[in-house]
Amino acid sequence: MPLRSLFSADTRPPILLALAWLTALSLVAAGTVLSWRAGQFWPTLILTCGTLATLALALGRGLQRRHQLLEKTRAALRQETDRRVSVVADLERIASNDPLTGLANRHFFMEDLDYAVQRARQSGEKIAVIAIDLDGFQTLNNAMGHDYGDQLLMAVAERLRTLEDSNHLFCRASSDDFYLRCYPLPELESLIHLMDRIRALFHRPIPMDDEDRYLSASIGVALFPDHVGDAQSLIASAEAALNQAAELSGTRYQFYNERLHERIRERMELHWGLHDALEQKRFHLLYQPQQDLATGQWVSAEATLNWEHPERGDLGPESFMEAALETGLTPAITRHTITLVCDQLRRWRQSGAQHLTIAVNLYGPELEDSGLVEHIAGSLRRCEIAPEALELELAEASLASNGHQREQQLRALSELGLPISIDGFGRGTASLAWVRDFPVHQLKIEPGFVRRVTSRHNDSVIVRAIIHLAHNLGMQVTATGVDTDAHLTFVNAHRCDFAQGERISPPLAPDELVKQISFNRSNTTEYS
């Protein structure tokens, strides 16, 4: 054994202990010999040798205990280091992964995509981003429960993961939305092949308990640098293409194009402008009258919120409400609308127009606004308006999601005394059970059916059926889209209660509405 290894860190304490024993024995031997030759000194030498031997032994034992303590400390440090490395790895995994599916989360995906775009700019390579949305998942999730929905999402993620490799990264972007990054993209044919593989995943059923569940998906694709030049725009373009694919049936995919780019630009301008419009109060109201077909009087009107856009002029709600829904501004816009309507009702009451009822549209997200009921109650108190004068029109499609929560909110609004109607009834979104269970006093027929009563027999049958349904449920019914004399004659002949449309009147400014209303109080309901 080399001399250097003999005194290594691992062998040093035992070697020193052995040397201490040898030293002690040597001293004892030397003392014995000397004491034998010179008898008169032997007690002193033996005592000295014994003392030195004892000190050597104590030193060896001390060194051994120190070595053992150092070994324990070193082992504890290794254990703590391993634990901290494991914790850091767990934190990194949690920060980058979706906890339900185990796929990358949106934050990690965007960082990865930013890095890929930077590299692709230097290398001239292409990137593809694919956006995937599960068709009808939210309805299924609400109907079957969130646990069922989570199992479906995990099954879909597991199948998507089979397509991952060093060039492909999947992430779960939101509830039922997934993104895929393909980088580098060698050629368009390989991308089309990948799309076909994704579609094939959805052609196979997903085993769920005792049944097989089939899902379809809408798929949008955007390319860098062909379509856009940065990561954020790449995502937005893929989502725009996805929305276009959603208009088709089955699992379809759609590539982004320039027309979609223009639509994205306009939509983003609307998103930014809506915030400014709310802050600067750039909204005003027009009112479309509803005629009581029994008396011929205009007793109510639907408030239409218009936006005074600084560049595009006066915009109706059909131009910006979808953008408001996307940005989450609908509750704030609805509160603002209710404030404007109550102020206008107060002015009309002060001028003598006591009988008017104004309807305000609700688009759905407002019913999840916990402060909506108090805001409406406060506005009515402030303007001294009876609740019966403010009607809420709920879009039929909004009943399909979060039904229980929204029903509770609707009941609270109904308890205030506010009339509630379902707008656009007949599109097929709301079931009759919802109409039965919600506190609804009126159905407003989808205008498309009314406009076709003279040209399509099936539409005329649907309109008659809705009128009879409403009356049998003890509700009133309004025909919207009454644009011609023939429309008016038809709905009047079938005992519809109210009519609204261009034949009755287009939307009017507040002063114009008052000028054209007959104030025959004996034929109208008066609110104090």
Image: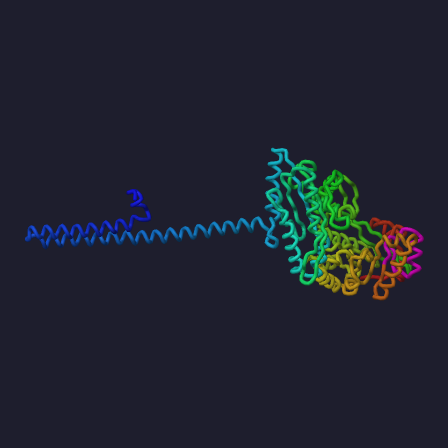
Q: Could you say which quadrant of the image residue 244 lies in? A: top right
Q: Quadrant of the N terminus?
A: top left
Say above or below: 462 vs 191.
below
Q: Could you say which quadrant of the image residue 467 lies in? A: bottom right
Tally of numbered discs: 0
Asked if the magenta segment contains residue 524, the reply would be: no
Check the image and tell me how it is coloured.
Answer: rainbow
Q: In the rendering, at what x and y percent does residue 59 appear?
A: 24, 52
Asked if the magenta segment contains residue 497, the reply would be: yes
Say above or below: 109 vs 302.
above
Q: In the rendering, at what x and y percent does residue 287 appear?
A: 82, 51
Q: Quadrant of the C terminus?
A: bottom right
Left or right: 119 as drawn, with respect to 292: left
Q: In the rendering, at what x and y percent does residue 476 appear?
A: 85, 62
- Is residue 339 or residue 412 the one in the foreground? 412
Report if residue 442 is visible in the image. yes
Report if residue 349 is visible in the image. no
- Which stretch appears magenta? 478-499
Q: In the rendering, at what x and y percent does residue 361 appear?
A: 78, 54
Left or right: 478 as drawn, with respect to 130: right
- Is residue 274 or residue 246 the one in the foreground? 246
Q: Could you say which quadrant of the image residue 257 lies in? A: top right
- Is residue 500 or residue 468 the one in the foreground? 468
Left or right: 27 as drawn, with respect to 109: left
Tell me what residue is drawn at x 23 percent, y 54 percent.
Answer: 58
Q: Residue furthest front?
A: 1
